[in-house]
Image (cartoon, rainbow, N blue to C red):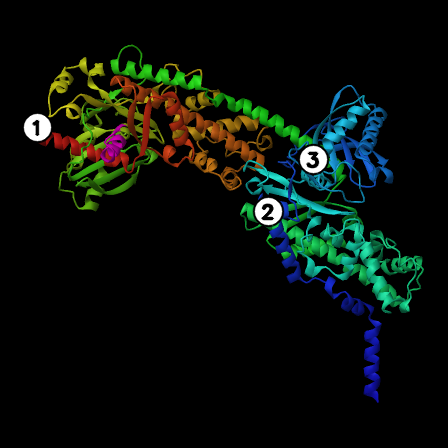
Amino acid sequence: MLAVHLVSFYFSKLQEDPTKKVDRFLHAMRLNDDQICEISARFLAEMRKGLSSESNAAAAVKMLPTHVRSTPDGSEKGQFLALDLGGSKFKVLQVKVREGVGVRKGEVEMEEKIYPMPTELRTGTGAELFDHVSECLKEFLHEKKIDTKKKHPLAFTFSFPCEQPSLDQGFLLSWCKNYRVRGLQGKDVVRTLRDAISRAGEMDMEVLAMVNDTVATMMTCGFDDPYCEVGLIIGTGTNACYMEDMRHVDLIEGDEGRMCINTEWAGFGDDGALNDFTTEFDKEVDAASSNPGKQIFEKMVSGMYLGELVRLVVLKMAKLGKLFDGHVSDALRTKGKITTADVAAMEEYRNGLKNTKDILMHLGLSPSHDDCIAVQHVSTIVSFRSSNLVAAGLSAILTRIRQNRNVRVLRVTVGVDGTVYKTHPQYPKRLHKVVRRLLPECHVRFVLSDSGSSKGAALVSAVAQRLTSQSRKVDEILSNFKLSEEHQQLVKDRMRAGLEAGLRSQGPFTIKMLPSFIFHKPNGKEHGKFLALDLGGTNFRALLVRFKKQKSRIYHKIYTIPLEIMQGTGEELFDHLAQCVCDFLDYMGVKNARLPTGFTFSFPCEQTAIDTGKLVTWTKGFNATDCEGHDVVGLLREAIKRRNDFDLDIVALINDTVGTMMSCAYEDPRCEIGLIAGTGTNLCYMEELKNVKKLHQKSGTAEKDQETPEVENGKETDGETRRSNMCINTEWGGLGDDGSLDNIITAFDTEVDQNSVNPGKQRFEKLTSGMYLGEIVRQVLLDLTRRGLLFRGHISECLKKPGIFETRYLSQIESDHLALLQVRSVLQKLGLDSTCHDSIIVKQVCGAVSRRAAQLCGAGMAAVVDKIRQNRGLDHLNTTVGVDGALYKLHPHFSQILQETVKVLAPQCDVTFFPSEEGSGKGAALVAAVARQNQEMLT
């Protein structure tokens, strides 16, 4: 008997727990984490669908580009008028950003007036609506005594779905929020506003930007928080926006930078994506709405519908006898009698049950205590589902941002506005908790927007003004690096004049035109083992090259040249080279072989024979003493002799440019030009001996050589094999040392030159080579930062260091196809806190500097190929250029721009560019092989 009483008591207790009853009734609305994650994944897929041009038309989530390309950086300023249209009220504002007395730096001052928006205007014609807006604007100007004759920038917040082809255009897609204005759908609402302002008269307005409330909210919060790149509205309606990488926005041309995307996520589920999560109550709300089948997500989430969902649930439970003993009042049967404000009141922490009872009694009901608990729990489940659904969508957006940035941990701020978020006592906390639980790898901060939609529109205009002004100033500075075709032709002409002057050695000449004493290119018959030594920068290479049957096999080892050796004494430098050679010979097991050796020495040398050359001047950061004016082959021989443990047969001295030409000529017999575009820059080519006047002025050996026939198999050869040509090492880096390039040299180039080891020398090289391009970029970045156009005007200590911006960064930055990730990575290494727009400007600077360098090299090359063509009296020249150097090989655009410039400036020449492999080293071995071959033939 006692057991029976206990069971009865147990079941009576179950019946007394009203929340359990509601939980069972609304189990479909109670979402667990797996379901929330599934909804989030579906929304992420819808985002991708909306961003794609192929699937956007069928996408339920429209992902509308807003043309807002930057969030505020805190430097915005100006006075703006703003209109805010999006609900039952309409606002006109005057917004001062860092302007006016009493406004502190970084603050925004606003004066506003709210005007009613009568129901008849919300369902009338477009002309009537915007005439009312314009009259309110005119009244505001008069009331605030704002000069109506002056042109005022105007920002327009229009909180309805629009397709925007530009920031100041917006074509209405559909109405919502109980607006049903006729004649505007598909029309440009900004044009309609302008027309209405014109009809009103007495005003001169420039509509700079149209945004919706979501974007405005993000911009408002972004003014105070640089991490804010998401806007969220949870109010009468709901929406979200975020900053998307342009490379993913198919609907807009261009792939650099970012743009704010207005998701219009209210339409999520319109294609059935949420069918398995919608309840009978959602379907009933949708069916009774003014747009059935549309805005499904909004109808499950937003303030316009939450109260109605609660009413329908309570009504159904009452009809089933689960509430109010089955009693249903007329008020409970009436649509709209429970509002979202009622839902918020029911869930108040202390007074929630009392408020619930008052609301139910106002509906003509007589609720018990358990009824009140149950109805309060219904309200909780409906609003909790709303926050869970918003968390799912927001998690998808944050996941996408994190993936775009390719970071493990994302720090981000979400700007939020809307009556549900602001007035519901539990909603924010629930939303924050779920988002952080779903995305532990995201450090998310939620910031409540202050006057978001109004202030934000003005900030969009302020940002647009800042970017326009900034872009104009940056373009003005970078215009100094732009070379017109006329400028390029001038450089070509001056290069040609410099070549001729150098060959004559008459008058002032800056292009040395040094004879190499190399009369022949490889013919494919080279064979045997040869040693090659290559000194041209911070590394020294030793190579063993074997030629056999037009093939080569190369073994090499690289040695570092310490800075103290580069800038020490000549004896220390050449002793170091001898030590490296000794180590390599031991390594290869050929220390006692005394192999024929070619020495690539990539510095200006005046040669009197193929194996003799006096250093004219150091370049590339070398400054070893007691070397200039001395025979570098002799210096190396003396260093080897001091060691007395090996010997070399040094048969040829060349520079890297000649080595590159010889190496490529081994593969392509048409190759007769060598180009280096790397740390330094230089060019060599095969010149007709009769033009090399400087040789004629010496002992006369050149004339004898010119007339001496070559002998092969006992027969005299002709044409190509006669000594009618010699490779000339131009040392073209000296062009401009006489001031001939002053008209294209910028203040940044002058700064780089003055801080170099050889001021006033190698001016052409300092405009074109890898050793200097990064430093030119650094100088430009410093100037832009000082002007407040970059990095918020803050110059980092790192950026002040000469040489810190390496030229390899230009290749990385200009190769960027990953939403400027490389740019930001480089800037982070330099200690620069950059915005996305900063990254775009840095890329522009790099592009301007590298493009000019490529065009200058192209103009110089055009002078050389035209000279060869004219030397031979040809109408058209086909030739090949052997090329080496990291700038040419690794920079994504340098080679193409150079080649395009040659085509334009030398249209009668068909020039093929042949990238060299192992150019300078293999070339030195080939010169040694050709020299040995010639010796054998003569003996």
Task: State the image coordinates of residue 225 (x, y, percent, origin top left).
Answer: 66, 40
The magenta segment is 658-672
For the residue marked with disc 1, what is the amino acid? Leu
Asked whether, in this view, residue 489 is left or right of residue 282, the answer is: left
User: Which residue in the structure is indicated by mark 2?
Assistant: 55
Alpha-carbon span between mark 3 and mark 2: 21 Å
Which quadrant of the view contains residue 743?
A: top left
Residue placed most toward the observer, 222 or 567:
222
The mark that comes first in sequence, 3 or 2, is: 2
Q: Are marks 3 and 2 in contact (CB under 8 Å)?
A: no
Q: Position of residue 907 (x, y in %)?
A: 36, 22
SS class, disc 1: helix
How packed is label 1: few (under 14 Cα within 10 Å), some, or many (20 or more)? few
Separation of residues labelled 1 and 3 (CA atoms): 84 Å
Could you say where residue 478 lies in the image, as x and y percent from the top left? 51, 24
* Mark 2 Cα shell of 10 Å, populated few (<14), some (14-19), many (≥20): few
Image quadrant where residue 694 sits = top left
Residue drawn at the location 54% of the way across and 34% of the way down:
840
Magenta-span inclusion, residue 768: no
Query: Label 1, on which residue?
Result: 938
Query: Is label 2 in a helix, a strand or a loop?
Result: loop
